[in-house]
Amino acid sequence: MTITITQILFWILSVAALFSALMVITSKNPVHSVLWLIATFFSISGHYILLSAQFLAVVNIIVYAGAIMVLFLFVIMLMNLNRETEPQKNRWIKMAGAIAGGCLLLVLVASLKNVESASTIEDVKGGDVGFIKRLGKELFSTYVVPFEISSILFLSAMVGAVVIGKKE
Amino acid sequence: MHLLVIDWWLILEKSLLIFGIIGLSFFIAMYTTYAERKVAAWLQDRRGPNRAGPFGIFQPLADGGKLFFKEEIIPLASNKPLFILGPALAMITALLTSTVIPWATPFITKGGDVIAMQVADVDMGILLVFSIVSVGVYGIMIGGWASNNKFSLMAAIRGASQMVSYELPMGLALIAVLFMTGSLKMSEIVGNQIENGWHIIYQPLGFIIFFVCALAECNRTPFDLPEAENELNFGYHQEYSSMKLGFYLFAEYINMFISSAVMATLYFGGYDIPFVNEASWGLNSFWMTVISFSVLMAKISFFLFVFLWIRWTIPRFRYDQLMNLGWKKLIPLALLNMIITAAVILLLKK
């Protein structure tokens, strides 16, 4: 059996992603959680690069790790959340959360079980699917309607945020 | 078992390049601190550092030595792992941005192998720089928060909101350049400028917006609110001492160096030699590489000087002025610049 660099990287990234995702939910300090979440985003970006989706990887870092997580950190730092001030949740609510999350995991695993992975991975590796030229052409030809609709959705969200912000 | 088919020559070549660039970044950052003090002295009609060595050129070494030997204090009430992570992150992100910059014309060996003077010419090119810059905020935020000091936290939040705000007009100004090149690759951006003239000719407004944003991203005057001494004591690195403080200060100078390199590459032709057709000289590849590299360094030095010049000329903005400038003036201007560029390109294509 030959081990390629891609496989080694895949295992390293998977372990990193799972470990940091676990740390997100087990850290006591919310600031630590946010930082572990950023680490998770980075390892997922690494997976995108392995799938030759470079654009997605970089945008994932710019938008999620670089912008949204900064806002998360802002809020958490300013509110100064810590263990003492955090309201203790009911045990039943915790259990309900765990069961709901478990159901979601089950559905995801079940839906991915029958995916034909080998052939699609070969397809992805050979092509330049994730490269920006190809992606741009696809987005603005085949998927132009959903693309424009989602951009209008973003615009309306922005206008909404401004309106709410202006209200005294 | 067949383990890891790796092109060891490539690894060696790239590692040499990486170490070279990192060494260069440190060297330039060191001497920018010296230049900063000399330029300040010159503008204020003083002499500046002149004790360590001739003209004080060993001053940065003395400063570095001093920082190394100072007592290292980690405040008891701080969050220790994050307190150490902050300056490390600031340094890592500052050094990472240099990966995609093409430093010189490719060097062609006698065997005909082409060695690119660039660590990685990835398809994403300039977007990679942006992603690293956007992550650079964390060095400041984590350091400021982990110090457990109200002034540090205020400064960290100021710095982060400033950097997030100024990334937007920076990106919008960049889009106009990308319209003209049609590629995100840094090598192609430079190639396009060698063929069709520098982008500064076509994008003067875009360059000014980019430059202002670069000042803000590097936390330089007039946007150095995170370090406003008279309102925030010393800013986000107030609790830091010894080489951790040194890392923060050094990271700022490395950021200046890299952003100068990015500006030179995006708008001033990168390593292109102005007004001449260097291909007709018939020099061998080694000398072409050396000359083009020195040309790029000259452009970078000029930008570094402008950074210093501005610092000792323009006073600091107020915080609301900073936000107004970013959101209400630069973003509309950058949008306008982008739309006009797009329209002109479409018209010319027809």
Image: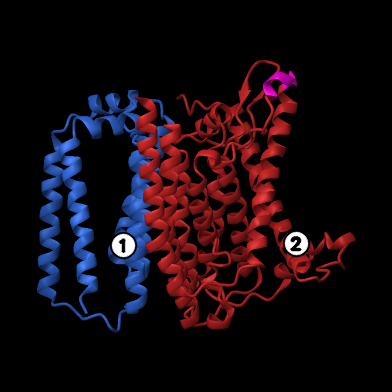
Chain colours: A blue, B red
* Neighbourhood count class around disc 2 (C-alpha, 10 Å): few under 14, some 14–19, many 20 upward: many
Residue B23: in sight, yes or no? Answer: no
Q: Is residue B108 above or below residue A54?
A: above
| Residue found at x 50% / y 25% | B5
Say left or right for B201 vs A63.
right
Image vertical order of residue B301 relative to residue B150, above or below:
above
Residue at the farthest right position: B54
Q: Nearer the viewer, mark 2 or mark 1?
A: 2
Range shown magenta: B278-284
- The question of residue B154 being in magenta is answered with no
**Residue B157 screen position, x and y as percent:** 43, 72
Mark 2 belongs to which subunit? B
Q: Is residue B281 part of the magenta span, yes or no?
A: yes
Q: Amino acid at mark 2?
A: Tyr
> Which chain is mark 1 on?
A
- Residue behind mark 2: B34
- x and y percent of residue B211 in the render? 54, 53
Q: Residue A137 in the image: state x and y as whole percent.
A: 28, 30
Disc 2 and disc 1 on one polypeptide chain: no
Image quadrant of residue B16? top right
Residue A24, labelled with which disc? Answer: 1
In the drawing, does residue B61 fall left or right of residue B154? right
Label 2, label 1: how far apart the Cα atoms are? 43 Å
Does the image show residue B36? yes
In front: B55, or A125?
B55
Question: 10 Å neighbourhood of mark 1: few (<14), some, or many (≥20)?
Answer: many
Viewer-side residue, A151 vs A4: A151
> Is residue B195 depicted above or below B161 in this figure?
above
